[in-house]
Amino acid sequence: MTYTVESTDAIHDGMQWSGNYSRVERHEFTMPDAATDRQVWRKARELVGLTGCRGRYLHDDAWMPYGAATIIFIYVVRDNNADLIAEAKRLIALNHDEYMATYETFITYKDGQDGRVYALPLYDIPSFIEGMRISLML
């Protein structure tokens, strides 16, 4: 399985930690399909220079070293991202929203009613598609 590890500076909004993205370091790596989560995280931390650091997991895909304003994300690289993005674009248009751009790990779109811009991580596209199909009754 292929993964992307992303290290960036962290920012706290008073409620939770998130990536600030003023400094970003990305690496792609491959692990055997039978690799444990621990093995994947060890390799990811090694690639961004945080081997041996203690930290905490914020989500399944995010880790922060103690005492540092840094956050590490892991994404699974899927071969079928192009098909998922195409389907997301189709549903965004059906909902009268405006697709904006595709980035390495997310897409952006603008709400057709209030003009807000949303970022949708690639790993969330399958659940986004399912939710849009339900709300549009497709």
Image (spheres, grey):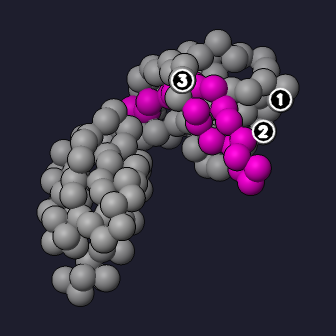
Q: Marks 2 and 1, how far apart in space? A: 7 Å
What is the secondary structure assignment of the residue under circle 1?
loop
Q: Main secondary structure of the magenta part?
A: strand
Residue positioned 25% across, 42% down in the render: 101
- What residue is shown with label 2? 56
Q: Quadrant of residue 133?
A: bottom left
Q: Earlier in the sequence, mark 2 or mark 1?
A: 2
Q: Amino acid at mark 2?
A: Arg
- Is residue 126 in view? no
Q: Which mark is residue 22?
A: 3
> What span is colored magenta in the figure?
1-20
CB contact under 8 Å: marks 2 and 1: yes
Q: Is residue 131 above or below residue 30?
A: below
Q: Marks 3 and 2, how far apart in space? A: 22 Å
What is the secondary structure assignment of the residue under circle 2?
strand
- Mark 3 against mark 2, which lies toward the viewer? 3
Q: Amino acid at mark 3?
A: Ser
Question: In the image, is 6 to the left or to the right of 68?
Answer: left
In front: 136, or 15? 15
In front: 1, or 90? 90
Residue positioned 36% across, 74% down in the render: 131
Task: Residue 45 in the image: state x and y as whole percent.
Answer: 63, 22
Q: Amino acid at mark 1?
A: Tyr
In front: 47, or 101? 101
Toward the front, the furthest residue is 114
Q: Assess whether residue 62 is covered by the magenta stretch.
A: no
Q: Which mark is residue 66?
A: 1
Question: In the image, is 68 to the left or to the right of 86?
Answer: right
Q: Quadrant of residue 70?
A: top right
Question: In the image, is 134 to the left or to the right of 95?
Answer: right
